[in-house]
Amino acid sequence: MVQLPPLPGWLRRMRMLWVCDGCGWRTAFLSGASCPVPGTGAPRANVDGDRRAVVVAEVPDREDYAFDLPVELLAQEPQEARGGKRSDARLAVLHRSGGRVEHRVFTDIVEYVGAGDVLVVNNARFVPSLLPGVDEEGRAVAVSIHSPQGEGTWHCLVAPQAACRPGARFVLGAGLQVTGQLLDETAAGRWRIALDPCDPATLYALAEPAYSPYLKQAPADPEYYQNTYASVPGAVGNPAAGRHFTPALLDLLRERAVSVAEVTHFLAARTRREVTRMLRNLIAQGGAGDLAAEDLVDGTRLSDEFDFPPAERYRISEHAADLINDRRASGGRILVVGTSALRALETVTGPDGRTQPGSGSTSLRIMPGHRFRACDAFLTNLHEPRSSELILVAALTGRDFLLDTYRNELIPRGYRFNYFGDSMLIA
């Protein structure tokens, strides 16, 4: 590893480096001088050279992405619960070239893609990930698992923080059928845990789902929280942007010679909100624990940071990569569905615009200034203020155009937000 000289004070105030490693601009760490090669996890030195350069960009201020969002616009149920179809949602179309906004319905998306284009979707399936339990002293604990690592180990978040130490043992899951031992802290607040049993299917069956914290109650039908094409279990959060596609709508696109490329990107838990909420419920039901101490820990955590996703696993098949590359070479456009699919594609697409197949993990943060290589158009849901998803979209549209659209076009018209809400196409 090549070590950088000590950073001056003005630079220490900045929170990240961007690195061109020959595969695109990637984030590195201010504490050292290397960042992982996308897809491998291996370190690559941040040194000047013919294919690498170091530039510095400051993470935006969260308050620059603030807007007033009425709570009644947080959708609590899907269109199907009201007798409609998934595709009945509204669709806001943002035209970057002219700075104008159209208000359509989601089925109109067929008008914005044509023969030879590719729709890229994330086929990851949402799975239960929250394991309630107790520690060796009988105190309530909650564990959120994601990203199995092999040899019986998983990544996880744990509440309460007081229970987090190497060697701590828990019994977890429905009926307390799972034993767990914390091994080491892999990042701030994130741990590696050994579980027995450790196979995903068994753990998912014993866990509870981590639905959006904005939902007041669980969906009436668990399938409401799945995309119709979701087929690969492992996502702790649901890739929501694809929710509006029905099988009939996808068939219509294929009839119009629009190809569908499936990639896999497993969303992981970003914050401790879900495990803290589970811990609160366990204590309310009579479990032993100190909520005041846990609230103090959560209250002292940095609140001025974006909820950037942690390292998340992805897989791009040869079939998907070939389809994307062949259609692009023939003049087709790439319409990417959702932030997770976009992060996976941007991770594996090189300076020549070719998407490489493979699997690995990515911590790519997409912010204004990002040089897009894998996306001609983008479909997403409506995101809450100050979120990392919002600044990702701003990297495509520009901050002012995006926030003006939210404040003056979408909110006054009553567009619905979050998982069961409406949709946005960046054209």
Image (cartoon, helix red, strand yellow):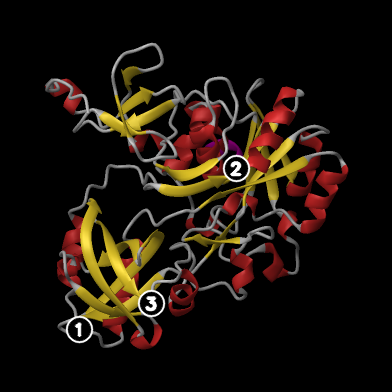
Task: Please provide percent x and percent y for residue 139.
Answer: 19, 81
Q: Quadrant of residue 354?
A: top right
In this view of the protein, which residue sits in the foreground, 271 or 424? 271
First along the sequence among labels 3 and 2? 3
- Residue, disc 3: 197
Residue range in magenta is 406-411
Query: Mark 2 packing: few (<14 Cα in 10 Å), some, or many (20+)?
Result: many
The image's mark for residue 288 is: 1
> In the picture, residue 160 is in which quadrant?
bottom left
* Label 3 with label 2: CB-CB less than 8 Å: no
Residue at 21%, 52% in the rendered image = 301
Residue 321's quadrant in the figure?
A: top right
Report the amino acid beneath label 3: Pro
- Helix, strand or loop for disc 2: helix
Question: Is residue 407 covered in magenta?
Answer: yes
Give the number of callouts. Answer: 3
